[in-house]
Amino acid sequence: MHSPDGQLQQSGPGSDGTPVTGIPQPGVSPIELRVLAVMAAARYHGVQLDRDDLRFPGGQPPEPAALVDWLRNAGLWARGVRMRWRSLIGLQSSAPVVLLLRDGGAALVVRTDPARDRVWTRDPAAENDSEPVPVDAAAMEAVWDGETILLRADRGNAYDNEPFSLVWLARLVWTDRKLMREIFLASLMMTVLSIVMMLLVMGVVGGVVTYRSYNTLALLSLLLGIAMLFEGFFGYIRRQLTIVLGRRVEARVNLEMFKRILGLPIDFYEINQAGAIMYRLGHIGKVRDFLTGRVLTTLLDVVTLLLLLPVLYVLNPILASLSLVAAILMVLIIVAFIRPIRRVYLRYADAEIAKSTVLVESVRGIRTVKSLGLEPQRKEAWDSTTAATGSWKLELQDLINWPQTLVHPLEYFMRNGVLLVGVYLAINGAMDAGGMLAFMLLSGRLSGPIAGIARMMEEIEDIRNAVSMAASVMNEKPEDARPGIGLRPRFAGAISFSKVSFSYPRAKSRALDNISFEIPAGSSVGLVGRSGSGKSTITRLLQGINRDYEGYVKLDRDDLRSINLTHLRRSFGVVLQENFLFRGSIKDNLIAGRPGLTMTDVVRAARLAGAEEFIERMPQGYETFIEEGSPNVSGGQRQRLAIARALIHDPRLLILDEATSALDPESEALVNANIARMAHGRTMVVVSHRLSSLTEMDQIIVLDQGSVMDVGPHRELVDRCPVYRQLWLQQTRYMQSTRAAAPAPVLAQGH
């Protein structure tokens, strides 16, 4: 309940029997209170939430799941729970707890007092230094039905902060301990049933044969049939539980994998081939299946082995020792081949990466392949990499075949050779027929687990390499290790570079060399210079793509590196030379990642970018479906859609990096005519080789070899800056000279 001063209060039926009515904070809606409560709780942990990241239907209070996702995306640990008063009063944490009230609002519990059976609450809309007020159970339960959000700073766990490895995956599997316990119990019951029944066989088979007791035989058959049914039931349960465990682990691994690859810096994708990345990530499935399949099955087999071996030694130590020696020899043979297999497997993996790269590059560049007639060359590259892969795979399989061949006689001996020894012992009276039969039946169950352990050891090298492959991507340093940390200021749009130097990795010279300049808020600035002068590097630094520079880059008065990275990029509208459109409608592409925007915003942005005229000519207008690779829109149309997408959220800062280079003259003229309207009320930085599109800019920054040569408007730069004047004359010379009349074309005659 919210009092006029912003606090929960009792005004009704509380402990004194008076009615409880909610008195909301004047001018603050319940929905706003719910948002403010979560933001206040996050601030306690040093995280400033961005309201643009919260997604929920307009006019309705945000659901707990949406609020939890909001907190988790900001780097906090959060969970939505339903609590009783007793659980709430027993919380020992000093961190605030968010209570979601029935009216859609929220309150913050800042302290609990179990001795007095009350909690201390603060209204989310009140000032941070306002005094909390006590609330008892009756007053709270009148407005609160138990929905609560618990949050704390993320202390890190095995999934987010530890490197990808077999141990990482094993801990992920171990989170389903309850399910694994049930699988273990099912396996244990299967093993116990088999041991009991075999001992029963051993005890009665002699009497059945000696005294020809058909009744005993019938009873034994019935018991064996019942045991078979129970064993089949437990086997079914174990398989079903294993399938469920595998699906759960697969979902968790896929979620974590996608989160990690999205968090990698752009530099990683620029220096690594897409085919190689996809091939390496594909090994995660192999490792996951190994853990939930082979390893889990082998661990269960070990349980069977530990239970069976003592029983077999009791039945006959000689036969049990023979089986154990054969098993040890199998393991030693496998171990001896591990190192050679590792060397060949690495060669095979490199060949597979090259093959995958050729395939991905050919598919992604199919337009270039078709337009230049490169099919023979790509086919030759594919044939070459396929041949290399096949050669190394053949060598690998040949090498793997050797331990399998050497192990086979030992495995055969465990199944059949021990039987012959048992018959020999039975003939010589060392064991009776019932004991021999029981041993044979139980040893048949022993050979499977031992062979499974041997095969698992054979696969371990393959899995080690698979882990290494996947880890080469999953363990890359993320772009932002703490996504919730950093300033989230409201930008006016002023930009300043102060003695900034930057070099790309492995570059021999600096991309930017001690540059300094200032861009006032709300002004339009062009960046010009020869190729490699540092124009695009400046835009990369502004977007936080590269942050390891020397000097200072500031937005307004805030150092760029102190600003939350997600907030920084959401404040920019960026249009590149090559832009990607997702599969989906034009409308979906324009409002991608911008919840709450309406059709009015879509139309306004399209009109500003000069895209409205061609969109309205399409059969389905804004609902026109964009296919993968955007084949149903031209390059110029795709570029105008990208400009509209950058403008739709009305950014304070706009970067156009060669945004009009792919446009035809008519489309470019249309966009250039709208640039003044685009720039209104925002800071705009335009990178362009076409100086004619920058003549109306407030300022133009001239770059050369990573240094700032001059800054000024077009007219002044033409007069005083040699670099700019040369670029201008190169592009306008054809306008200042009269072209000689070209000779009329002559149609060649057939002579």
Image: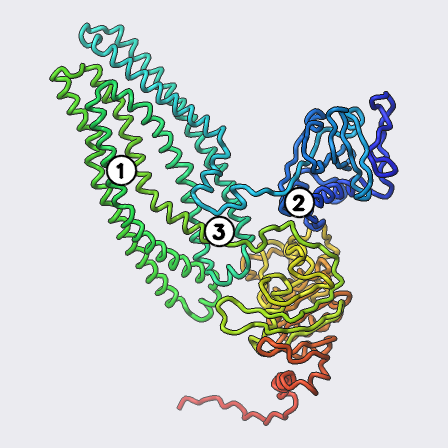
For badge 1, the amino acid type reads Val
Mark 3, secondary structure of its residue: loop
> Residue 284's spot in the image, x, y percent?
44, 46
Q: Quadrant of the C terminus?
A: bottom left
Residue 174 is labelled as none
Mark 2, secondary structure of its residue: helix
Q: Which residue is mark 1?
A: 331
Q: Which residue is mark 2?
A: 70
Labels 2 and 1 touching (C-beta < 8 A): no
Which of label 2 and label 1 is nearer to you?
1
Mark 1, secondary structure of its residue: helix
Q: Earlier in the sequence, mark 3 or mark 2?
A: 2
Q: Residue at x 57, y 66 (%)?
A: 578
Which of label 3 and label 2 is nearer to you?
3
For badge 2, the amino acid type reads Trp
Q: Which residue is mark 3?
A: 475
Q: Residues within 10 Å of mark 2 (few under 14, many from 20)?
A: many
Q: Quadrant of residue 460?
A: top left
For badge 3, the amino acid type reads Asn
